[in-house]
Image (cartoon, rainbow, N blue to C red):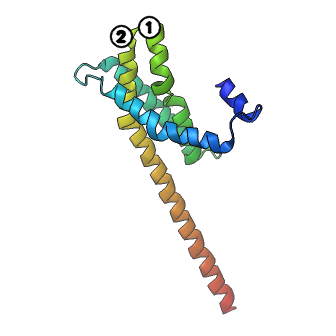
Amino acid sequence: MFLAYASVKWWKVFSAEQCSGINRFVAIFAVPLLSFEFISRIDPFNLNYLFVAADAVSKVIVLVVVLSWAKLSPKGSLDWSITAFSLTTLPNTLVMGIPLLKSMYGDNQEDLMIQVVVLQSVIWYTLLLFLFEFRAARNALMVIKLSDQSTSTKAEEEQY
């Protein structure tokens, strides 16, 4: 990670256009194919339910804490809640976690990470998409409300 950062920011090995191309390749081809490769090996009837439940409970607790912070704190917002939830609960298990876990603990532990990746893909990314859509809809409503207020103020000014 440090070498990648240094090669772009300090050494100028890659241009912004090249970085964009690499990111696009990873997002469109590499991650979906890697996800498919790992997900195709999971046995849904042989899950470690205790591990899955612990992962789900920890994510729900973080979600409740972050959303409570957004609602109760004057500095809290839905945007920061989404970001905080993503950073704290959705680690890079697919690209880095699975190979590292496999090399450190063997093939048995790889199955646990694959279970987490599958549940992240099915449940938690769907929840994030819902939160993003909710945020976009709320922002669109605020824009409409502000434009209605500005047109009503203009109409009032024209009357005077």
Is 16 or 79 nearer to us in this picture? Answer: 16
User: Furthest residue to the top?
Assistant: 105
Measure the C-alpha gap from mark 2 to mark 1.
8 Å
Q: What SS does tag 2 mark?
A: helix
Q: Is residue 18 above or below residue 110?
A: below
The residue that appears at 49% across and 30% down in the rendered structure is 89
Q: Looking at the rendered structure, which numbered label has been put on residue 72?
A: none
Image coordinates for residue 50, horizontal then vertical, percent: 33, 18
Residue type beneath disc 2: Asn
Task: Evaluate if marks 2 and 1 touch, with contact meaning CB atoms under 8 Å apart.
Answer: yes
Q: In this view, does 114 lie to the left or right of 65?
A: left
Q: Name the residue under label 1.
A: 105
Give neighbour class at mark 1: few <14, some 14-19, many 20+ (Cα, 10 Å).
Answer: few
Image coordinates for residue 152, horizontal then vertical, percent: 60, 80
Residue type beneath disc 1: Tyr
Quadrant position of the N terminus in the picture:
top right
Give neighbour class at mark 2: few <14, some 14-19, many 20+ (Cα, 10 Å).
Answer: few
Residue 68 appears anywhere in the view: no
Residue 38 appears anywhere in the view: yes
Q: What SS does tag 1 mark?
A: helix
Q: Looking at the rendered structure, which numbered label has been put on residue 108?
A: 2
Is 95 or 51 nearer to us in this picture? Answer: 95
